[in-house]
Image (tube, rainbow, N blue to C red):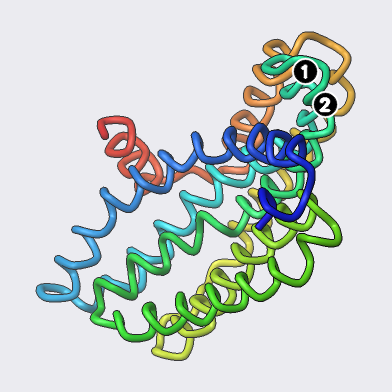
Amino acid sequence: ILKYTRPEEEMGLFSAGYKLITILTFIPTAFTQVIYPVFSGFQTTAPQKLHKALEDSLRVMVQICLPLATGSFILAPQIMAFLFPPEYASAAVVLRIISAGIAVGYLAWILYSFLIAVNRQTFCMWNSLGVALLVFSSNMLLVPVFGYTAVACITMATELVLFLSSMLYVRHIGYPIRGIMVYAKVLVAAAVMAGVLILMQDLPLVVTAACGGLVYFGMLQFLRTFGDQERELLSRILQR
């Protein structure tokens, strides 16, 4: 829709910002390859462990995706300047908008893997179909008027809708998400990292990103957020 209704340069700007996000999809892909067999195994042999396995998986993914989203949002202009010529500077807004969806979008991958493992494929199919129709309609109405920023906003909204709908359904079938304090600690660590990134954003990108990452993981250790489950899941993901 963007290609056929807007100037050609807008397609290039959107593609430049979106390309960086697609590279990061290896994270939820590798993660779901690790946890889906766990969910499936518990479904048949130890269903009483399913709830904890889901909560552990979501907690680990939050610890991964939140700093990625925060860092990409804050450093988007520097990232685009580092990777692309100056004429692509406007693509930073695409990276910022879509990266905000990462904060919840990757959690939807976990929830969908869980629902498929517990034989809720019908919900996943109809939910995906409904969201797809909504996305198509939104693009048809908004993209010809607002261009590539509309595509980015719709992409971010899609991640949010998929996450909320699947989370509510998971809660409906008896698996509410607990342990809010752990997620609050991750938010605090990400907020501290964001402050460091803002203060250091005039420095070279590699230096700023490295310092932000060190501060984030240091805060997670200080707040005692890591557990045995995190270490085990992270090691399996790295093996993937």
Q: Which quadrant holds the N terminus?
A: bottom right
Contact (CB < 8 A) between labels 2 and 1? yes
Q: Is residue 56 left or right of residue 39?
A: right
Q: Circle 1 sits in a helix, a strand or a loop, which is it?
A: helix
- Can you give x and y, in whole percent of width and height, for residue 97 in the image? 75, 49
Q: Is residue 210 above or below residue 98?
A: above
| Quadrant of residue 194 within the rendered picture | top right
Which amino acid lies under the numbered mark 1 shown in the image of this protein?
Ala
The residue under label 1 is: 81
Local crowd size for mark 2, using a 10 Å CA cut-off: few (<14), some (14–19), many (≥20):
some
| Nearer to us in this view, 136 or 94 | 136
Left or right of residue 240, residue 64 in this image: right
| Mark 1: few/some/many CA within 10 Å (<14, 14-19, 20+) | some
Q: Quadrant of the C terminus?
A: top left
**Disc 2 target residue:** 89
Left or right: 162, with 41 as reference point: right
Location of residue 27 with respect to 46 vertically, above or below: above
**203 horizontally vs 180: left or right:** right
